Image (tube, rainbow, N blue to C red):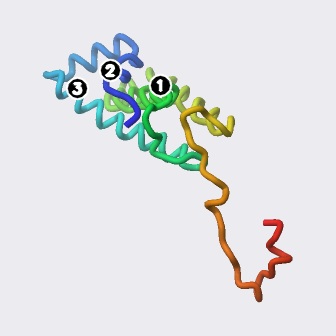
Amino acid sequence: MYCFPDDVLEELYLPLRKQLTEHFDTEDELQQFLYIHIKRASTYVDTFLNQHYIVPVSVPIPATLVTITAKLASYYAVANFSELEDSAKDKRDTAQAMLYQILKAKSFTGLTRKSSSQLQGVSDPRVYPESKTRGW
């Protein structure tokens, strides 16, 4: 997981944070609730980054990934209160835009790119001779 419950709470707008914290009887219940959404957000980030980077990202986690994960987790947490989902939609949209920018940059400090040499294969030379496949 790429962030902690406190990171998620910091992303919430104050009225939403207040409603969320008042909804749970104990701090532990709130923490468990947020960890579920942090796990979902971390999985989403890994799925997205897996296209070009080795995941899961190793420690230390880049601050940008902490922010992205916290924004997504805050959106997921608020989405449980369906009447409030739209008020946190900008968090999700911002997190997705940040992920797209990471992929667009093609390199990002703290992330290890997948090697293109991982994609190797050899065909039957009778079907696709070396002279035909060399450019691939």
CB under 8 Å between discs 1 and 3: no
Q: Nearer the viewer, residue 103 or 54?
A: 54
Residue for badge 1: 67
Q: Nearer the viewer, residue 59 or 71?
A: 59
* Mark-to-mark CA distance, 2 and 1: 12 Å
Q: Which element carries disc 3, helix, strand or loop?
A: helix
Residue 49: image x %, image y %? Answer: 55, 43
Determine crowd level at label 2: few under 14, some 14-19, many 20+ residues with C-alpha closer than 10 A. few
* Mark-to-mark CA distance, 1 and 3: 20 Å
Q: Which image quarter holds the C terminus?
A: bottom right
What residue occupies the far top of the structure in this picture?
14
Choose top left, top right, bottom left or bottom right for residue 104.
top right
Q: Which image quarter holds the N terminus?
A: top left
N-terminal label among 2 and 1: 2
CB under 8 Å between discs 2 and 3: no
Kind of residue at disc 2: Asp
Q: Nearer the viewer, residue 118 or 16?
A: 118
What residue occupies the far bottom of the structure in this picture?
126
Choose top left, top right, bottom left or bottom right for residue 2.
top left
Residue 43: image x %, image y %? Answer: 42, 44
What residue occupies the far left of the structure in this picture?
25
Q: Which element carries disc 2, helix, strand or loop?
A: helix
Kind of residue at disc 3: Leu
N-terminal label among 1 and 3: 3
Residue 82: image x %, image y %? Answer: 35, 30
Choose top left, top right, bottom left or bottom right for residue 60.
top left
Q: Which mark is residue 6?
A: 2
Q: Residue at x 45, y 39 (%)?
A: 58
Q: Residue at x 21, y 16 (%)?
A: 22
Residue for badge 3: 30
Q: Which mark is residue 57?
A: none
